[in-house]
Image (cartoon, grey):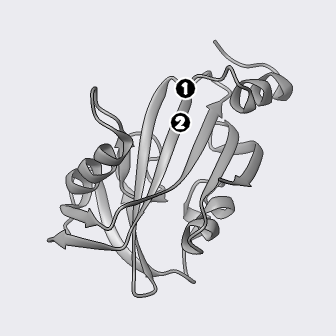
Amino acid sequence: MALNSTSEVVDRVDGANWRPKEEGTLCFVIQGGEILLIEKKRGLGAGKVNGPGGRLEKGETAEQAAIRETQEEVGITPTGVQWAGELRFQFRDGYSLHCTVYRASGWEGELMETVEAKPFWVRTDQIPYDRMWADDEQWMPRLLAGEKFRGWFEFDGDRMEWSKMEKA
C-alpha cells in the first residue's frame, strides 16, 4: 500500500503502531581514526556507500545478524561489537525497515571484496556523505562520537522527505 501524504508517513514511521516489513542491521568497524565502509553492489542501496549489513534471518538477533552480514560481505569478524542505535525507514512505496546499528572496535580475519560489497577504509573526517543515503549525515556523526541514537526517516525513492533524530 503506497502512502499518499507526509503526515500519513510521519504517523506510521514515528507512531507507536508502526511495524516494519523487514528487520535489518548495520555494523561499522571504527579503529585508529578510520571507519570501514563498503560500496554496495546489490540489493537496497546498490551503488551507494554504507556499512556492512543486511536483513535478519529467522531466529537470529540483530547483533548476530550484524556479525554474520559483516563476515559474508567483507570476510572479517567484527569484535568489540556494541549497540549504537536504531533507525526506522518508511518509503513512500510502502516498504519499511527497522535497522539496528552497531559499532565494533576491532576485527579478525582477512578483509576482502565479495559479490555484495567492496570494502574500503576512510578517515572519519573524510566520510563520503555525497555517495551515501541522505540520512547517514544525520546519525553517522553521533555514531563516531560514541553516542547512542534513534532516527526516523521517510523516503520517496532515494530522496529523504522527513527525518527526526534523538539520543537513545
Q: How many marks?
A: 2
Q: What residue is drawn where x is 54% and y is 75%? A: 127
**Dot 2: element:** strand
- The answer to whether the residue labelled 2 contacts the one labelled 1, judged by CB atoms less than 8 Å apart, is yes
Q: What is the x, y in percent for residue 60?
A: 28, 35
Is 71 situated left or right of 94 in this image? left
Of 73 and 80, the residue lying toward us: 80
Q: What residue is drawn where x is 64% and y is 49%? A: 150
Q: Residues within 10 Å of mark 1 (few under 14, many from 20)?
A: some
**Dot 1: element:** loop
| Above or below for 60 versus 150 | above
Q: What is the x, y in percent for residue 136?
A: 61, 59
Q: Quadrant of the N terminus?
A: top right
Q: CA gap, disc 2 to disc 1?
A: 6 Å
Q: Amino acid at mark 1?
A: Pro
Question: Looking at the image, which residue sits at the far bottom?
Answer: 32
Q: What is the x, y in percent for residue 166?
A: 73, 53
Task: Determine which of the numbered discs, if any, sits on residue 148 in the image.
Answer: none
Q: What is the x, y in percent for residue 73?
A: 25, 54
Residue hosting label 2: 98
Q: Earlier in the sequence, mark 2 or mark 1?
A: 1
Residue hosting label 1: 20
Dividing the picture into quadrants, the one containing residue 139 is: bottom right
Q: What residue is drawn where x is 62% and y is 44%? A: 158
Q: What residue is drawn where x is 85% and y is 26%? A: 7
Q: Amino acid at mark 2?
A: His
